[in-house]
Amino acid sequence: MRRRLFAAVACLAAIAAGSGPAIAQEQTATQFYTTYRAAFDKARSVDELLPFMSAERRKQVEATEPEMRKKMFGAMKAMGTYTSLKIVKETRSDNGATLAVEAVDTDKAKVTGTITLVKENGAWKVSKESFKSS
């Protein structure tokens, strides 16, 4: 019985090895920002968004008093209530990417935005977001 089990495990290992190593796909800037926006929509505090922020932006948030953080987060959520967010262009650079986005605000007006992302230690981070109504 043990020999059969060992043979089955060895066979599965050989099949897995024969299929080649799994190559991890690098997340694109667009994929990262989509993940960030989903986290943003669900977040109940700015602390939940810290892992997505650039070191510079994170430092600014962490230097803010807890009561001010709550107010700042409230303002972020109020200003970031866009729907139908669509990334229309991704432009890569040596140290990051810029995303051109379109969305709809709470008044159903079209909004355009520019998102600046940076690569820090191999991971995408949000550096700056700016939106304006058409």
Image (cartoon, rainbow, N blue to C red):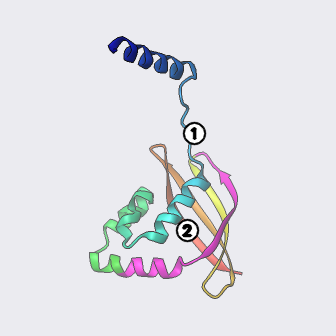
Q: Which residues are magenta?
A: 71-94
Picture quadrant of residue 85 = bottom right
Q: Residue at x 60, y 49 (%)?
A: 28
Say which of 84 and 92 sits in front. Answer: 84
Dots 1, 2 in contact, CB < 8 A: no
Furthest residue toward left: 66
Q: Quadrant of residue 59?
A: bottom left
Q: Secondary structure at mark 1?
A: loop
Q: Position of residue 43 (x, y in %)?
A: 41, 70
Distance between the Cα atoms at labels 1 and 2?
26 Å
Residue name at image x 60 percent, y 45 percent: 94
31 versus 49 height, above or below? above
Please identify the quadrant where the N terminus is shown: top left
Picture disc at residue 129: 2
Q: Nearer the viewer, residue 130 or 106?
A: 106
Q: Where in the figure is residue 37, as x and y percent of width and height?
A: 53, 65
- State the image coordinates of residue 14 (x, y, percent, origin top left): 50, 16
Which residue appears at 55% of the width and 32% of the height? 23
Give the residue at mark 1: 25
- Kind of residue indicated by mark 1: Gln
Q: Earlier in the sequence, mark 1 or mark 2?
A: 1
Q: Is residue 48 left or right of residue 88?
A: left
Asked if the stretch drawn in magenta spans residue 84, the answer is: yes
